[in-house]
């Protein structure tokens, strides 16, 4: 066997003659080893490419899982935020209900220890076996809203009834228009201090210290607040049910026309304006437009 090698050595080809069996064996072994090495390299290259493809697939899966986890986290956070908002609304609803309950309790004059809105109700019961069912928080909150709306409507109706009763009680004049002082003139016939003649006095006079506070003897609406002939500075309050009260000779009026006042509220300061001989309040009670003796109303609390 002749093997011709083309090289640049001396510008001519080189010929190698192989005709001995030993030489052929060596050449065969060399070729076999060369093919083995080439095959091994090709195998490793293929494995490397396959591994790279698997790594790419795993990376893509991890990326997708990260995206899924991120989306699930956002959805969970959104649901949690919605639950927190509804919980806040529910808490505000409970606060309003508690305030309304406290108001109704005061109007009804209930014992705070017997029915306390500030604390949870006393309830209890044995522990039941777990049914294994999931709790629907949205359903529970919706049910609580429904119950609270119903209770609030009931308490509102009760409040209106009690307020009507309470206002009716406040509309009835009773008590003195001053805290300190004395009765200087009663309702009825008396000698006029200016003319000396006997005439009808259609009110009661309460003498006291200049600037003393004058109080409304019933709740109502102010229908007059200002100077009036004979009365000086006058406050007139309409209480409903035909009742009107007047407070005259004030040094100054505190309330204005149209203002709603409560029983016991300060309406003026005692003075001596108008036809007056000294600091006092001229107190009148009118029933359906007719002036009546205030004494029975003044003594109502005594």
Image (cartoon, rainbow, N blue to C red):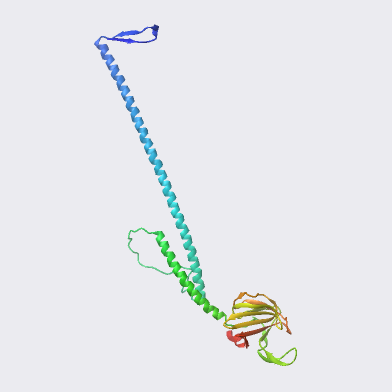
Q: Residue furthest front?
A: 289
Q: Pick the quarter of the image with the N terminus.
A: top left
Residue 174 visible: no
Compared to residue 260, the image places residue 26 above or below, namely: above
Q: Residue at x 46, y 55 (%)?
A: 81
Q: Residue at x 29, y 17 (%)?
A: 31
Residue 86 visible: yes
Image location of residue 273, percent across then percent down? 72, 81
Q: Quadrant of residue 271?
A: bottom right
Q: How many marks?
A: 0
Q: Residue furthest left?
A: 21
Q: Nearer the viewer, residue 148 or 270?
A: 148
Image location of residue 291, percent across then percent down? 63, 87
Compared to residue 237, the image places residue 26 above or below, namely: above
Compared to residue 27, the image places residue 114 above or below, namely: below
Q: Residue furthest right?
A: 195
Q: Is residue 144 left or right of residue 179?
A: left
Compared to residue 33, the image places residue 198 above or below, namely: below
Image location of residue 22, percent across then percent down? 25, 12
Q: Nearer the viewer, residue 226 or 207?
A: 226
Image location of residue 78, percent across then percent down? 45, 53
Q: Is residue 28 left or right of residue 202?
A: left
Q: Quadrant of residue 42?
A: top left
Q: Pick the quarter of the image with the C terminus.
A: bottom right
Q: Is residue 285 left or right of residue 44?
A: right
């Amino acid at each position: 066997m002749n093997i011709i090698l083309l090289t640049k050595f001396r510008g001519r080809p080189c010929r190698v003659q192989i005709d001995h069996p030993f030489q052929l064996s060596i050449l065969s072994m060399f070729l076999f080893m060369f093919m083995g090495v080439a095959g091994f390299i090709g195998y490793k290259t293929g494995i490397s490419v396959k591994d790279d493809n698997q790594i790419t697939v795993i990376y893509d899966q991890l990326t997708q899982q990260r995206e899924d986890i991120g989306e699930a986290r956002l959805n969970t956070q959104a649901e949690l935020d919605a639950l927190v908002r509804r919980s806040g609304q529910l808490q505000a609803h409970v606060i309003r209900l508690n305030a309304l309950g406290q108001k109704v309790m005061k109007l009804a004059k209930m014992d705070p220890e017997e029915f306390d809105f500030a604390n949870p109700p006393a309830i209890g019961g044995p522990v039941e076996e777990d049914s294994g069912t999931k709790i629907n928080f949205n359903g529970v909150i919706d049910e609580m809203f429904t119950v609270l709306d119903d209770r609030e409507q009931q308490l509102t109706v009760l409040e209106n009834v009690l307020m009507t009763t309470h206002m009716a009680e406040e509309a009835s004049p009773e008590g003195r228009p001053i805290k300190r002082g004395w009765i200087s003139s009663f309702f009825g016939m008396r000698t006029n201090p200016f003319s000396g003649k006997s005439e009808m006095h259609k009110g009661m006079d309460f003498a006291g210290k200049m600037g003393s506070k004058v109080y409304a003897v019933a709740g109502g609406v102010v229908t007059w607040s200002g100077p009036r002939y004979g009365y000086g500075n006058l406050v007139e309050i309409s209480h409903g049910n035909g009742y009107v009260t007047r407070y005259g000779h004030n040094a100054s009026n505190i309330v204005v026309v149209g203002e709603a006042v409560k029983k016991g509220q300060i309406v003026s300061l005692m003075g001596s304006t108008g036809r007056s001989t000294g600091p006092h309040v001229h107190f009148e009670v009118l029933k359906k437009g007719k002036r009546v003796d205030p004494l029975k109303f003044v003594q109502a609390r005594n």
